[in-house]
Image (cartoon, rainbow, N blue to C red):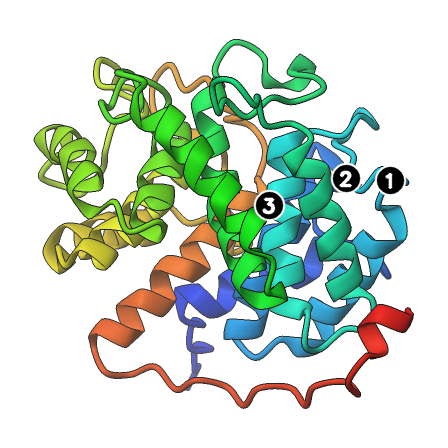
Amino acid sequence: MLFRRKKKPSHERAMDWCKAHTVPGQGVIVHTKQPAPYAEVTGYYIPTLYQWGETALARQYTKWLLSIQLPEGGFPAPDGVPYTFDTGQIMRGLVAAAADVPGAEAGLRRACDWMLTQVDAATGQLKTPSTELWSDIASDLIHTYALPPLVRAGQLLGVPRYEEAARFVLAYYKRQPQLVPFNRLSHFHAYAMEALTELGEMDLARQGMADVARVQRSDGSIPAYPDVEWVCSTGMAQYAIVWYTLGDKARAERAIAWLEKIQNPSGGFFGSYGKGAKYIAGAEISWGVKYFLDAWRLKLMSEGRWSEPAAPAPHAPGEAARA
């Protein structure tokens, strides 16, 4: 009699993908057709890894990021230039690692100080040294997603001006009429929706998610843009996160169920699926896995099945400052 090996749960396969596509001693790759470590995504993986109890990998990622921090405090994108958005995502990781990895707190402080140099003092817009890698599908509105880690850093480090700067910048973006509507690639729209929930702007997030709800299909999928057939996998996972946060469990679960159906045997996800797919359709992207893991954690929490892993022992007081 033949016995079939039981298939691993989808979230375990996703974590396996992350581990299999991590560059030894460094971070997670960009995608399977560009297998170089990606600082931005490595940064926002760190909180996820801690949440799932993958402390050793979180520490590896943090130490590598600290080793590549630029002298002025920012962090380089794949083209070697510091981007404000990328630095913000690495700050998410440094906030999570500050009590665990020597040097993380000092690196976080330097990154925050650098980010404040990118704030337009007159308007509050968050600037960036370059947008070369954004192509024509990203916009300045993604900078809202760099604000929550600045707020958290201010609270963690006891530096009020970080939080004050974040609120000043948020006020600028709240004045932009294009911020809330679902009018761009779902992945980038979802950055803003998640940022709004993190910053306590629940009513604005609900407005944006009402647009998304109107186009969610019966199978749970959501078009990458309101007027296309194809789907962006990362946007799907991010929307599930936002719906869980807003208390719309039913829509979140439909989105996760669709993602589980299209998850590749490797545990990863192509950038997009469907006829006419245009967002990294032929490669497995690292950020899709990160947000899928985040969504699954919220799913388990909503079902009362999540057990928080033990927190790592903090390093000795002052160790971060000396590193």
Q: Does 54 sit left or right of 197 as displayed?
A: right
State if disc 2 and disc 3 touch (CB < 8 Å): no
Say which amino acid is labelled 2: Phe
Pick the residue in front: 165 or 220.
165
Pick the residue in front: 8 or 90.
90
The residue at 24%/54% (across/down) is 257
Pick the residue in front: 233 or 86.
86
Q: Does 272 sit left or right of 217 as displayed?
A: right
Query: Residue 64 in the image: x percent, y percent?
Result: 83, 56
Residue annotated with mark 3: 89
Question: Relative to 88, does residue 154 appear above or below in the rendering?
Answer: below
Q: Does 83 sit left or right of 155 as displayed?
A: right
Figure quadrant of the C terminus: bottom right
Residue annotated with mark 2: 75
Q: Residues within 10 Å of mark 1 (few under 14, many from 20)?
A: some
Query: Residue 152 in the image: x percent, y percent?
Result: 51, 58
Q: Is residue 159 visible?
A: yes
Question: Relative to 37, does residue 105 appear above or below in the rendering?
Answer: below
Query: What separation in Å lies between label 1 and label 3 (alpha carbons)?
Result: 15 Å
Say which amino acid is labelled 1: Leu
Question: Relative to 76, does residue 318 appear above or below in the rendering?
Answer: below
State if disc 2 and disc 1 touch (CB < 8 Å): yes
Residue annotated with mark 1: 70
Q: Residues within 10 Å of mark 3 (few under 14, many from 20)?
A: many
Query: What separation in Å lies between label 1 and label 2 (alpha carbons)?
Result: 6 Å
Q: Quadrant of residue 38?
A: top right
Query: Residue 278 in the image: x percent, y percent?
Result: 46, 17
